[in-house]
Image: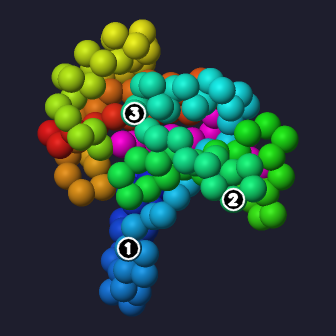
Amino acid sequence: MQIGARACEDSRLTTHYSRIFKNMIKTFDHVVLTTGDLHRCLDFYTRVLSMKVEHYGKDRIALRFGDHKFNVHPPGFEAGIKARQPTPGSLDLCFLADRPLDEVIAHLKREQVPIEEGPVVRTGARFPIRSVYIRDPDGNLVEISEKA
């Protein structure tokens, strides 16, 4: 019963803070993707997920998709400020596809990208989602979803 009591306490705390603080964050602008192999990373995200490579600043690289982007930090890149332990393969990402999931699955099969799990129904941020899970070359977990 300890777990149930803790969950109830956490639920009350969350409700309390939700009433006090209004949403301050609207959306995200970018995420930093640390890679151990720049070429394999760019190939995967452009070929498999159809992102676009963008060059900016002094020797900076990003992967753009919709209104968002990944700033890519390759081996040896020294950012002025960064995560304490930037580590390739530590992300767990979820994308909403712009096409039916069955088309995504067919594309992944053509590109010989193994599906680790799915399709399965999960709880998304805004609605139930139907997802498949794959890995990028660094081992990051990549979930591709559609509205269930």
Residue range highlighted in magenta? 85-95
Q: In the rendered image of this protein, does residue 47 appear above or below residue 6?
A: above
Q: Secondary structure at mark 2?
A: loop
Which-is-in-front pick, marks 1 and 3? 3
Which element carries disc 1, helix, strand or loop? loop
Q: Nearer the viewer, mark 2 or mark 3?
A: 2
Tell me how far mark 2 sits from mark 3, CA to CA.
Answer: 23 Å
Task: State the image coordinates of residue 55 (x, y, percent, origin top left).
Answer: 61, 49
Local crowd at mark 1 within 10 Å, few (<14), some, or many (≥20)?
few
Q: Dividing the picture into quarters, in which one does residue 136 lie? A: top right
> Which residue lies under the disc numbered 1?
26
Decide which of tag 2 and tag 1 comes sooner along the chain: 1
Q: Residue at x 38, y 58 (%)?
A: 67
Q: CA distance from mark 1 to mark 3?
A: 25 Å
Dominant SS type (magenta): loop
Left or right? Give the position of 69 relative to 15: right
Q: Which residue is mark 3?
A: 50
> How many residues crowd around disc 3 within 10 Å: few (fewer than 14), some, or many (20 or more)?
few
Q: In the image, what residue occupies the spot 68% across and 36% down? A: 35
Circle 3 — which element? loop
88 w.r.t. 134: above or below: below
Does 148 appear in magenta?
A: no
Q: Amino acid at mark 3?
A: Ser
- Identity of the residue drawn at 27% across and 39% down: 97
Q: Is residue 119 visible?
A: no
Do tag 1 and tag 3 residues touch (Cβ < 8 Å)?
Answer: no
Query: Is 33 displayed left or right of 44 in the figure?
Result: right
Question: Image quadrant for the C terminus?
Answer: top left
Dot in front, 2 or 1:
2
Q: Which residue is mark 2?
A: 57
